[in-house]
Image: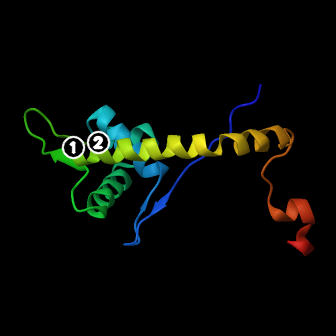
Amino acid sequence: MSQPLRTTIRIDLENGVRLGPGKAQLLELIAEHGSIRAAGAAIGMSYRRAWLLGDEINRMFRQPSISTRHGGKSGGGAGLTEFGRELLSRYRRMEEASRNAMHTDLDWLASNADPTASARKPESIFGKDNA
């Protein structure tokens, strides 16, 4: 049996920022690991990139989603604020609702997909002159 189709959602807010699977995954991993560095490492992201993405998430809404603790004897760390936990929960609920709403159409797509097909560059399908 084939793998179910994977869908993602991205929400484009009126202020021009976007909330999608990457930011949701980072929030989830910060909650799991208690660290921005560890969350980034878990998805192969540099600490700098994870920190910048976390900072962007914190500036997206009126309230921050990520809280940090400075280092010292007990070490630093990060976690989600109450707002961040609610944001992640609502995003995951929207993902589930969208999958449920598209279930029939996703099944149709899956049953009609060519299992031997793969993503190709346009020139490999049409030739370089027609790309």
Residue marked by disc 1: 82
Instruction: Please tell me the numbered disc located at residue 85.
Output: 2
The image shows residue 19, relative to residue 67, as above or below, that is below
Graded by Cα atoms within 10 Å as few (under 14), some (14 to 19) or many (20 or more), the crowding at tag 1 reads few
Kindly tell me whether residue 15 is visible in this rendering: yes
Residue 58 point in image, percent of width and height: 27, 57
Q: In which quarter of the image is residue 32?
A: top left
Q: Which residue is drawn at 47% across and 54% down?
A: 20
**Camera-nearest residue between 97 and 7:** 97
Q: Is mark 1 on a helix, strand or loop?
A: helix
Could you tell me the amino acid type at mark 1? Glu
Q: In which quarter of the image is residue 115?
A: top right
Residue 109 point in image, percent of width and height: 77, 44
The image shows residue 66, relative to residue 4, as above or below, that is below
Outermost residue toward the left? Answer: 73
Are the residues flagged by discs 2 and 1 in contact, CB closer than 8 Å?
Answer: yes
Residue 116 point in image, percent of width and height: 87, 40
Could you tell me the amino acid type at mark 2? Arg
Q: Is mark 2 on a helix, strand or loop?
A: helix
Q: Which residue is drawn at 58% across and 40% down?
A: 100
- CA–CA distance between discs 2 and 1? 5 Å
Kindly tell me whether residue 81 is visible in this rendering: no
Q: Which residue is drawn at 42% across and 47% down?
A: 91
Residue 110 point in image, percent of width and height: 77, 40
Image quarter (top left, top right, bottom left or bottom right) of the N terminus: top right
So how many labels did they put on this image? 2
Image quarter (top left, top right, bottom left or bottom right) of the C terminus: bottom right
Q: Which residue is drawn at 42% across and 37% down?
A: 42
Graded by Cα atoms within 10 Å as few (under 14), some (14 to 19) or many (20 or more), the crowding at tag 2 reads some
